[in-house]
Amino acid sequence: MLDPPRVKRATPYGLEAGLVAALFGALTACGSGDVSGVPNSESVASGGGTVDLAGAGGFGGFGGASTTGSPSGEGGTGGQAALLPTCESSAKAGHYCANDKVANGVADTLYRCDGPGPASDATPCEHGCFVAAGSDDFCQLVLPACAHKAQLKYGLAPAASDELRCIGITAGLITQTIGDAAASAGTHGKDGTIDGYAYSAATDLSVKTLTNAQVKVLINDLTTHGFAAFFRDPGKDGWPATEARHIHAIYVNVKMKASLQSQVSDWLTGLNGLVSHTKYTFYQASPAQKQLIKSLFDAKN
């Protein structure tokens, strides 16, 4: 009986050649990330396509021969590890921007350091990271863009009116804009005219229905919207016990009179904005809020 015909294995020669060539190229690279003696553009036929040897990454990256020519040997386990953000030797416990005592940090990112070593708590800063001298760095704030609408009340600068409306302030809560109340000592006098609107940078707000905790929330909102605001609580922080309980808010993104400039300077340094210039204890703004108010104030005054 004749032996049955031997069936030849149907493996294209081109595939075997391609695999052998890729293996040889990766082994000779041996960690160098480069295929020695093989031009970057050289490809070997593999029956079903081509294998680009430019993608072979050293021995640790074998298996990284790719059709994309990625120099990192994509798909393998080798290649150089990314450098992690590290707090430099001079870093003390605190927060630092990527370009301040943090090596290999991502731009516009705030990091936490607990001394030299790995940085932690990376926080992206949408509006940039601010390097503060002598204190923690912080993510910068910008003035919110509020839609321009009809003036809430006579005596408000148009932009101040828009920012107050954004917060939720209604005309009924505004007790004084341009005015001459004796307790105000002239601070509510007219500061100028914008687009035909006479304005005072100072605005008084009623807080009759608010608790002190709610007043603090409102002052925080006012600060983020460009106001240096003081809570006038009778008998507290230098405010006379006989005077009305209210918020005195100064919109800093406009030109203002010298007496209001002095009050804003007090606010920035933690003082009460009164003749006594004593410490203001009810509310202390964050460094980011103070930097926002200062930048707006300095631009116009």
Image: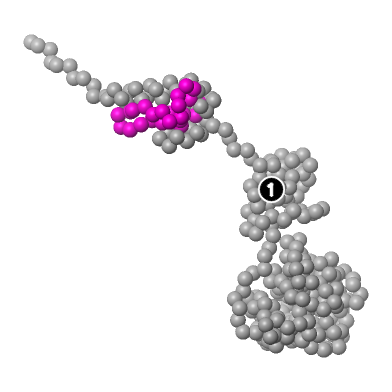
Q: What residue lies at 33% left-to-right and 28% top-to-bottom?
A: 46
Compared with 103, 77 (above or below) is: above
Q: What residue lies at 67% left-to-right and 56% top-to-bottom?
A: 128
Residue 48 belongs to magenta span? yes
Which of the pair 247/202 is nearer the observer? Answer: 202
On-image quarter of the N terminus: top left
Compared with 21, 127 (above or below) is: below
Boundaries of the magenta span: 35-58
Give the main secondary structure, helix, strand or loop, of the magenta stretch: loop
In the drawing, does residue 6 fall left or right of residue 269?
A: left
- The quarter holding residue 48 reads top left
Compared with 148, 2 (above or below) is: above
- Three-letter amino acid code at disc 1? Ala
Q: Residues within 10 Å of mark 1 (few under 14, many from 20)?
A: many
Residue, far top: 1
In the drawing, does residue 72 fall left or right of residue 272?
A: left
Which residue carries the number 1 mark?
98
Q: What residue lies at 81% left-to-right and 67% top-to-bottom?
A: 268
- What percent of the width, then of the height, locates residue 260? 82, 77
Q: What residue lies at 76% left-to-right and 61% top-to-bottom?
A: 287
